[in-house]
Image (spheres, grey):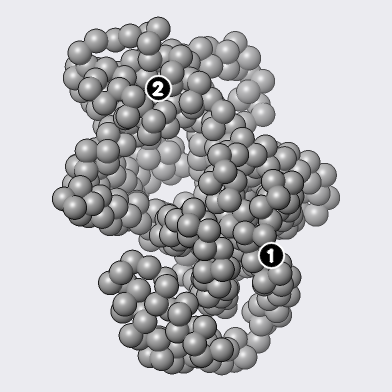
Amino acid sequence: MKNGSKALKSGVWYTIGTFVVKASSFITTPIFTRLLSVQDVGKFANYSSWLSILMIITTLDLYSALNVARFDFKDDLDSFIASNLLQGSFITVVFFGLIYLGKSTFLRVSSLTDFELLLMFLYCLFCPSLQMYQMKCRIEYKYKISVFLSVLSVLSSTFLSLVLVIILKNRYFGRYVGYMIPYIILNFGIYIFLLKKANSISIKKYWKYAFVIAFPMMWHTLAGNVLTTSDRVMIKSYCGSDAVGLYSIPYSYASMVQILWISMNSAWTPWALERIDEGDYKSVKSATILYTLFFGVIIFVFLLVSPEVLYIMGGKTYISAIGVIPPIMVSYVFNFAYAFYANVEVYYKKQNYIAICTGIAAVVNILLNALLIPRYGYTVAAYTTLVGYIVLLLMHFLCCYFLKKIHLVNNKFIFSFLIAYLGIMLLVQFLYKHVIARYFLIAIILVGSLMGIYIFRREIKQAIKTRSIVPITNRKRGII
């Protein structure tokens, strides 16, 4: 019971820390968009996209092996972490060594400078130390340290970026240098700390173990990252930094939906998998309807208030890119839906299917970007992203079908909901031109939501108390 309480408290604080980190980027966006030119915003978006891709490739996401190693090496986890850090450093040096051999070609393709590449190398070299240490803190329920490090890193990075952008003539230089330096310094300190804590370093024992676990899942992580970042990289290549800047700000707002989904899914997945394990498929299908409609209503409100939020984030300059938001947000609705099928694959230990599906969707997205961006401009990248997520959903549907587990998912409702949302995507773009009608619809949704909360107030209170959706679904079945 004591460990359960610690786990709950740790989970709550970890969620808060993650939200603070993610939200800080969203909150400071209006400041940076008014200090930086559209071109500088685009250049930083391009820089961030390449950093996220290289971070996965040059480290192989070895820190993910800690989730399993915590059981197999629980008596000497510090030595595993230190050995894993050195392995990651070795791989990073090798990869960046290869990049530097073809540096001129890479810099031309990525539109980066020598100094930008150097900072990326230092970041990738030391950043896994923070990831591993925070994971170790979560394993030991030391949530205060984990949250403190998350908040410290993002606040120091944001503060230094703001100071340098204000005082330096080259504001883009101040933006990326201010972002990178605090992370590099903090991660370097943790890197040395973790090496000193190790009792021993074992290359043979730990390196192969970590590589075998992390390498397959790295491809899933990489493909997922490519699916979400390739559009900005390719817009930079075909249309220039200004176009990336115009695209990245509405994309940043739309991606807030992903943060919401991650938070909701962390609560949904354990409950759904428990029901599947018990053979209670009926409860999962019934709850899927309520869960999906709840998510759908929230996204609809996000879509309706997009013009006002985009104006706050970027001012009049970025209003012309409002058309990017609906297809990107609807992409995340399809991402939400694919998780119902992915959870079934995880339960039946078919994680390799997830990597394959994500990889295929990423390839489709890249090919469409290469074909359509030069012809139609940066806005079409939002629609190619949507197509990529539609492909991802269909691939997972087919996987469950061939696994003969398709009956575990409420397919008829999910696909009806998604088709309706494609219609909503077109509707909101029409409503952006009719402010009064849009505000009237927002008011109706808010009043309806408040009435729903009032009607289900006892069930909602019981669901929060028991951390289960059952009380709400039971009431739902009773009123139909």
What amino acid type is highlighted by mark number 1? Asn
Q: Nearer the viewer, residue 90 or 283?
A: 283
Between label 1 and label 2, give the one nearer the viewer.
Answer: 1
Q: Is residue 107 left or right of residue 94?
A: right
**Looking at the rendering, which quadrant does residue 196 occupy?**
top left
**Looking at the rendering, which quadrant does residue 157 occupy?**
top left
Q: Quadrant of the C terminus?
A: bottom right
Q: Nearer the viewer, residue 334 or 328?
A: 334
Which residue carries the number 2 mark? 125
x, y percent for residue 37: 52, 52
x, y percent for residue 393: 68, 54
Spatial CA distance of label 1 from label 2 is 44 Å
Which element type, helix, strand or loop, lies under badge 2? helix
What amino acid type is highlighted by mark number 2? Leu
Which residue carries the number 1 mark? 411
Measuring 65% from the left and 87% from the top, which residue is drawn there? 434
Residues marked 1 and 2 touching at CB (< 8 Å): no
Measuring 33% from the left and 15% from the top, which residue is drawn there? 83
Where 167 sits versus 435, above or below?
above
- The disc placed on residue 372 is none
**Looking at the rendering, which quadrant does residue 383 occupy?**
bottom right
The earlier-in-sequence mark between 1 and 2 is 2
Residue 421 visible in the picture: no
Where 278 sits versus 144, above or below?
below
x, y percent for residue 75: 22, 22
Q: Is residue 373 left or right of residue 477?
A: right
